[in-house]
Amino acid sequence: MMHPGQAVTLRETESDDDHAMEDTERNTASPAMVLRGLHKSFGAQKVLNGIDLTVGCGQTLAVLGRSGTGKSVLLRLIIGLQKPDAGSIHIHGREITHSNLEEMNEIRKKMGFLFQHAALYDSLTVEENIAFPLRRHTEMTASQRADRVKELLAGVGMEADLKKMPSDLSGGMQKRVGLARALALEPGILLLDEPTAGLDPITSGEIDELILKLQEERDVASIVVTHDLHSAKVIADRIVLLHQGNAVIEGTFVELEKSDDEFVTEFFKRDS
Amino acid sequence: MSDQANLSRRWISQDAPQPAAPVRSALTSLWNSVNGLLEWFGELGIFVWQVMRAAVRRPFEGRELIRQLDEVGSKSLPMVALAGAAIGAVLALESRHSLVQFGAKSMLPAAIVFSIIHETGPVVTGLVVSGRVGAGIGAELGSMKVTEQIDAIEASGVNVYKLLAFTRIVACILMLPLLTLAADASGVLTGWLADTLVEPISFHKFLHAGFAGAGFSDFLAPTFRTAVFGLIIGVIACFQGMRSQGGTEGVGRSTTSSVVLSSLFVMLADVVLTKLILVFFP
């Protein structure tokens, strides 16, 4: 199994050309998500202004940008919680912006979504929260479900908290349970909204490690919205920086670091 | 033109009455209100359509429906029975005084029974349930909405209109007539108690006198009218809860509006349905 530290070392020593070539191959071979010309406004406020993105299977794209630049909206458009004003979204080759609720629900079963504040069902225990999608969408028996829940919780280091209510958990623990729930149906696509925000560095590292593991073992395509540059550096194959509804730059961490664009420089300088 | 003249002209133009401005402002305000109302009804129509579409598709959410039947039915029973009892006692005390004055004391059991099963039982049940259940549903769904729990259910590929709205609406429709029966029963019982404390009469005799002139339609139509009250309470509370926004303040607003609007529409429906019942079951 690869550890985050190893991944960083490996990526930092790889040549940019090799990395870019590998990414291009992954993208063109089997893009999991293709977003073209996405526009979204709320009243007079333009949030997304023609976003184009492609994420291949097994690839992780980190979306960075200032607060309020539409990063979370982008994820909500992909999962169908909101409709774009214009543009198209292809999931595994299928256009979804005109899908009806039933079609969208079928597509959603193949996607895992981690909300910014975990959004655990507060009237259900940790176990019931994770069992929720399994009970709804699989033919598993109660004992198979229980085993799967334990396995998922062990994956995020929460196996001892099976019977706890979400209100008994810290923010970081809730996020880990949320991640376990997002992985319950073994999705091919993961959408993570600030998975490490508000977490201590050790827990953040564990979550990064988990995302890398999924990327490696299950070829999961992920979009990770984050403000955590270190996390983006560790888990992302590519990074896109949003500003005023546009993707100002897209590339590897090293490419972005080297950019002489004023906004990009400012963004990266702040963190260093 | 002199400076003095310019100044006075400026003053005149500023102070001159502009009769169109208040009218325009009132019209704008009226237009906004009408627009808001039409928007609300439009969104309500879309919501009802989504629930109806979800209702005819599998799975039928039996487990959640049973939970909601318990939540709406058995948990509202004590309060509904208590309200019915209070109404029965008050009716007995008030009616006795009036009927004695007109020399129609023997009509007291019939007056109590008819008042309760025809009007007060169904309306009191409707209002009590719109308060208890309407607030409960509005607050629960509102808080689920603002904490993104409804989005999380939707994101996991589950139809929220069916799981959250349809089950609650059906529970309200099924439980309201049963709760009305409970309110009627406790009202008649306390009506007899209040009556017998003043002038002893056996319960059997009281019931016999009370139901002597009552037909099947006297009982059935008013009781099943409450199924419509249940539909109104369920739809309004789920709709207000699921469109809640703006944190805890938004939850408070959706809770209040659930209760206020469902009570209001229950009373409006009561007027319309009473007229219809009188037309079809004279």
Image (cartoon, coloured by chain):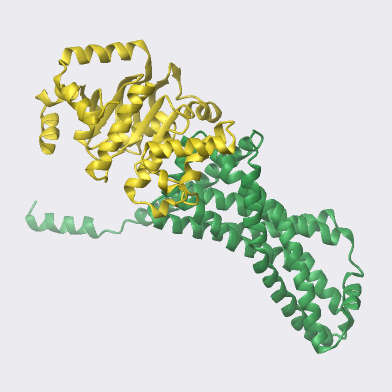
In the displayed structure, does residue B47 sit left or right of residue A3? right
Residue A137 point in image, percent of width and height:
55, 32
Corner quadrant of residue A19: top left
Whether residue B14 is visible to the viewer of this picture, yes or no, is yes
Which residue is rendered at x = 30% and y = 36% of the image?
A: A207
Locate residue A17: give its quadrant: top left
Determine the image quadrant of residue A218: top left
Q: Which chain did the image draw in yellow?
A: A
Residue B44's place in the image compared with B92, above or below, is: above
Q: Is residue A192 left or right of residue B3?
A: right
The chain whose colour is green is B
Q: How many marks?
A: 0
Q: In the image, residue B23 lies at what x, y percent?
A: 40, 55
Res B45 seen here: no
Would you place residue A107 above or below residue A150 in this image? above
**Residue in the picture at 55% in, 49% down:** B238
Q: Where is the C terminus of chain B found, in terms of image quarters?
A: bottom right
Q: Position of residue B240 (x, y in %)?
A: 51, 51
Q: Nearer the viewer, residue B180 or B61?
A: B61
Q: Single out the residue that lies furthest toward the left.
A: B2
Q: Position of residue B199 (x, y in %)?
A: 84, 88
Q: Along the horizontal axis of the image, is B217 left or right of A221? A: right
Against B197, is B163 above or below?
Answer: above
Which residue is rendered at x = 45% and y = 45% of the image?
B149
Relative depth, front residue between B159 and B11 = B159
